[in-house]
Image (cartoon, helix red, strand yellow):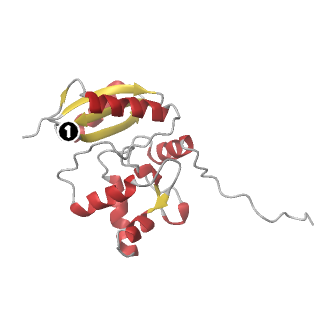
């Protein structure tokens, strides 16, 4: 059996948790307002995990997460993950989602098309995003519903958290300003 360790840490966005094994990072918990609630959410997903001191590569990722929530442009695409146990198609979706860079967005349908699937696979992409074990590191918050609508978000705070993360990256979620002006008569 693989040994999982985890730690909880504070960021400008709240308390996060990260879990790892000897292969890579296995889980990431987006911020909540309290250390205990974050730990509870982490242990719900990795009940066998024990608190531990992060190795250097996990400490580096924690430092990057803190910088992210402080507003710095961070690229998590090189963070070593262990996605063992994930559905093969979901892993392909996660690889594609990791290519969506800071301040950019895509849609469920676009990711499905990028993977050579039809529009019906957009639902699968949405399910993969909802089950993302390492949200933020695999940037599911950058994947939107059709028409650029925010869509759902299964993290604490739901769609509001997704919107805050996108705003932190400079993504404007407001509808575009009208091109035509009213003449007022």
Residue 83 is situated, as x and y percent measured from the top left of the image, at 22, 49
What residue is pinned by disc 1? 46
On the rendered structure, is 151 left or right of 79?
A: right
Q: Which residue sits at x=46%, y=52%?
A: 142
Q: Position of residue 69 (x, y in %)?
A: 48, 33
Q: Residue, x 25% and y 35% (percent of image)?
A: 19
Q: Residue 111: image x %, image y %?
A: 40, 64
Q: Residue at x 26, y 64 (%)?
A: 89
Is the residue marked by circle 1 packed among few (<14), some (14-19), or many (20+) residues within 10 Å?
Answer: some
| Residue 147, picture quadrant | bottom right
Which residue occupies the extreme right position in the image?
185
Give the camera-side residue of 169 and 159.
169
Q: Residue 15 placed where, x, y %? A: 39, 29
Mark 1 element type? loop
Q: Which corner quadrant of the image does residue 36 belong to?
A: top left
Location of the N terminus by quadrant is: top left
- Residue 39 visible in the picture: no
Q: Is residue 37 visible?
A: yes
Q: Indicate left or right for 140 with 149 as reference.
A: left
User: Is residue 7 shown above or below 28?
Assistant: above
């Amino acid at each position: 059996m693989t040994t999982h360790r985890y730690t909880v840490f504070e960021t400008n966005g709240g308390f996060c948790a990260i879990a790892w094994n000897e292969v890579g990072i296995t889980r990431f918990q987006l911020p909540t307002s309290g250390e205990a609630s974050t730990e509870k959410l982490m242990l719900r997903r990795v009940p066998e995990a024990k608190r531990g001191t992060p190795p250097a590569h996990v400490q580096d990722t924690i430092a990057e997460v803190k910088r992210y929530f402080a507003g710095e442009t961070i690229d998590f695409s090189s963070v070593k993950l262990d996605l063992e146990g994930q559905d093969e198609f979901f892993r392909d979706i996660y690889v594609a989602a990791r290519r969506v860079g800071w301040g950019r967005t895509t849609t469920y349908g676009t990711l499905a098309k990028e993977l050579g699937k039809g529009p019906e696979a957009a639902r699968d992409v949405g399910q993969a995003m909802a089950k993302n074990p390492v949200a933020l590191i695999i940037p599911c918050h950058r994947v939107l519903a059709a028409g650029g609508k925010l869509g759902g978000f299964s993290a604490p705070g739901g769609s509001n958290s997704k919107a805050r993360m996108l705003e932190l990256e400079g993504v404007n979620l407001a509808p575009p300003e009208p091109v035509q002006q009213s003449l007022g008569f």
